[in-house]
Image (cartoon, helix red, strand yellow):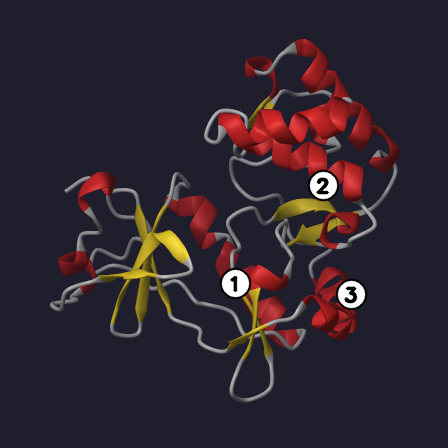
Amino acid sequence: MTRNDGPPLHLWDVRIKATPVPADNRAVRAADRIFRPTTRSDEAVAWLNDVHDLAERAGFAVPRHVPSVNGRLVEDGWTCEMALSGRPFAPTELPQIRTRIAVFHDLTRRVPQRPDFLSSQSLLKWSRGGDIDLDAMPPEVAAACRAAWEPLVNQPLTVVHGDLSPKTLVRCADGRPGLLGWDESRRDVALFDRAEAEQPRLAWQVAARWTREPTRARRLASRLTG
């Protein structure tokens, strides 16, 4: 079974039919499990285990990955995680998690880099890491991305969520904020989880989406280079 055919549910001992997740057209749900397509390695997904431990210590609920019956976290290009339910966050609620995010950043300062990833600082020298391949981009766009990351060069590194926004947050029934969407998490500058880092975050979106979402990436790049 390939990623285009749907997840191999039997490898997680799931025997019921999966249905699409309304808020995520790539994911499907079966009972209390969410299955998502991924290009990450098993090691890159496993790296999130310790990160999620620390996120929970900081006061977040997180969607834990479930190993398959083979003990792997990635099977045929799919992952399985426990569903995390809650009401959506409003943009005005984002300031409520600032303290928790700061605690999370403090707790993760010694976590090593995610397998296959590079930080924005490392990408000033190297070209490939995670979803990013600067050599595949027009030189002027790659240069604009690096120029946006250059001011971060001497800042300390920690683990960042990488996609912090109302769409990746829910308010769980127990009152905790649930933090979803960890696919772009990595070791980088904490500013990537703050609204004021507009240009560095925009540059990351452009670079990370250049090959997999080229139309959107080029539209975003016009804001970066214009």
* Element class at badge 3: helix
Please, which residue is most extreme toward the top here?
139
Give residue 62's position: percent from left, percent from top: 51, 69
Foreground tag (3 vs 2): 2
Residue under the image location 78 percent in, 43 percent down = 198
The correct choice, above or below, for 23 with respect to 191 in the image is below
The correct choice, above or below, for 86 with respect to 24 in the image is below
Q: Which mark is residue 68?
A: none
Answer with the quarter of the image where residue 126 lies: top right
Residue bearing mark 3: 102
Q: CA distance from mark 3 to mark 2?
A: 18 Å
Foreground tag (1 vs 3): 1
Please, which residue is most extreme toward the bottom here?
174
Instruction: Using residue 111 as the reference point, say whether residue 34 is left or right of it.
Output: left
Mark closest to the chain's N terminus, 1 or 3 = 3
Instruction: Name which residue type carries label 3.
Output: Ala
Mark closest to the chain's N terminus, 1 or 2 = 1
Looking at the rendering, in which quadrant would you find the N terminus? Answer: top left
Instruction: Name which residue type carries label 1.
Output: Leu
Circle 3 Cα neighbour tier, 10 Å, few/some/many (<14 / 14–19 / ≥20): few
Q: CA distance from mark 1 to mark 3?
A: 17 Å
The correct choice, above or below, for 174 with respect to 213 in the image is below
Residue bearing mark 1: 180
Residue under the image location 51 percent in, 27 percent down = 215
Residue bearing mark 2: 201
Give residue 166's position: percent from left, percent from top: 62, 63
- Does residue 193 appear anywhere in the picture? yes
Instruction: Using residue 161 as the reference point, say whether residue 152 is left or right of it.
Output: right
Looking at the rendering, in which quadrant would you find the C terminus? Answer: top right
